[in-house]
Image: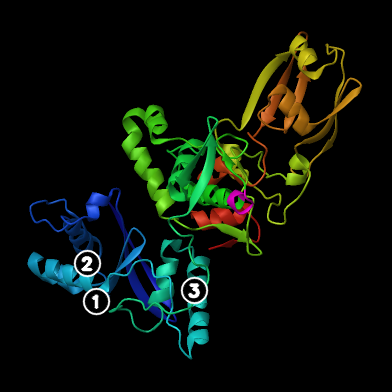
Amino acid sequence: MNINHKNINFNGESKLYIYIETCDEYEFGKEFLSPDNPENFFSKIKNYVKNILKSKDEDVAVLIVNGVLIGAISLGVFLNSSDQKVKQEVEENTKNNYIVAANYIKQNENEKNKENEIQKDISVIEENNKSPEILENIKTSVNKPNNPVINKPAPKPNNPVINKPVPTETTIQLKTGGTVITLNLEDYVIGVVAAEMPASFSSEALKAQAVAARTFALKKKSEGSILINSTAHQVYKTKAQMQSMWGGSYSTYYNKIKNAAYSTKGITMKYNGSYIDAFYHAISNTKTELPSYVWGNNKPYLKSVSSNWDSNVRGFKVSTNISYTTLSSKLGINVNSSTEFKVLSETISGRVENIKIGNKTYSGVKLRSLLGLRSADFEIKKNANNVTVTTKGYGHGVGMSQYGANEAAKEGYNYIKILKHYYSGINIS
């Protein structure tokens, strides 16, 4: 179980939030207050408050567990009273203040003004890189900005708030091994993140991947397409495949990826109200590519942006030797040590746009495909019996760089900031 806290300023007033992330459901089950277990849920909160927050001036903190707003707790009770009193207070607050990711705002004659205040507060949080998992909860909790304690559940009016999350029961169809199966969207997202990104990556990078995978899937679903379990769309792994891949680390890695998916549940990227094509690739050559060079058409949110983080990762620059015999076979022309290799043009990102080999011209993307190169950013050096091809980056280069995202996370970028860097002008909701 992970615990941390943040002070968030609303209209000049500082409010203390305590965030708790549990790795498994049982941590927050019916036995979480058991006095027989010194490592129970309650004891960990108490120790955190006593040891970490002992010098805090606030009397009240808002408790959020796995992104769900549970209610307000009195810090004074944790610091000064007996365990029994603390237990009673937590039980009472949990009973009276339990709010499940509130999706509605009270509708009345002042609703428009209140929504403006809410949006202003949310903007402040995003600008200061605060944790985005509680944005939907804050939309409810700031109905009365000057009141730090929430004492009753949110009402359920007729009109939903803007940016209502994707329903948890959303399903997708996936073609895998010649069979079309139906999967819960979030289970699918877990399987894609496990297949498409190393589980050892930072949690914020995994969250960014989860949002990209979810958006990609819903884009295809909105177009009436069946998703394909391959690099043509996204690769998906079952739990059995994850167990085979991770072995003894299965439980640790699965829970890490599950938390990344569930903490961003329902969150997607849109441009002008529509799901984006959330393309991504492994390693950039320090700049992302325009899709027109790869597929022939551009998207306003898929611009060429810097990704200098990638130059620090293993596999950024790779050299391989290819014999003239192999070149001749794959290119369908005679290639030898006297053949001329001339790059005619480069793309905006520095990848090869067109190259002339002998008397024949190839696009960089086509040559990459024919020779199985890691990237279209390549240099070719002729030798007596072969050529040495040195590539930078790995993949088509469009959209989010996965290794770049991980390096950005190491520098303190949260997943929203990562996504907004790689996808220009998008809305995350």
Please name the residue that numbered disc 1 is placed on.
59
Dot 1 or dot 3, earlier in sequence: 1
**SS class, disc 2:** loop
Residue 161 circle label: 3
Main secondary structure along the magenta-highlighted residues? helix
Question: How many residues crowd around disc 2 within 10 Å: few (fewer than 14), some, or many (20 or more)?
Answer: some
Residue 380 locus on image (x, y percent): 76, 23
Please name the residue that numbered disc 2 is placed on.
54
Vertical order, 91 against 113 (above or below): above
Question: In which quadrant of the rendered view does residue 150 lie?
Answer: bottom left
Residue 86 locus on image (x, y percent): 13, 68
**SS class, disc 3:** loop
Q: Is residue 195 magenta?
A: no
- In this image, 177 relative to 270: left or right? left
**Residue at far bottom of view:** 109
CB atoms at circles 2 and 3 under 8 Å apart? no
Q: Tell which tag, 1 or 3, sits nearer the viewer.
A: 3
**Cα distance between the residues tagged 1 and 3:** 31 Å
- Is residue 57 in view from this perspective? no
Q: Amino acid at mark 1?
A: Asp
Q: Amino acid at mark 3?
A: Val
Which residues, given as a range, are shown in magenta?
220-224
Residue located at (71% from left, 49% from top): 304
Residue 68 circle label: none
Dot 2 or dot 3, earlier in sequence: 2
Q: Nearer the viewer, residue 24 or 314?
A: 24
Question: In which quadrant of the rendered view does residue 315 lie?
Answer: top right
Q: Is residue 223 magenta?
A: yes
**SS class, disc 1:** loop
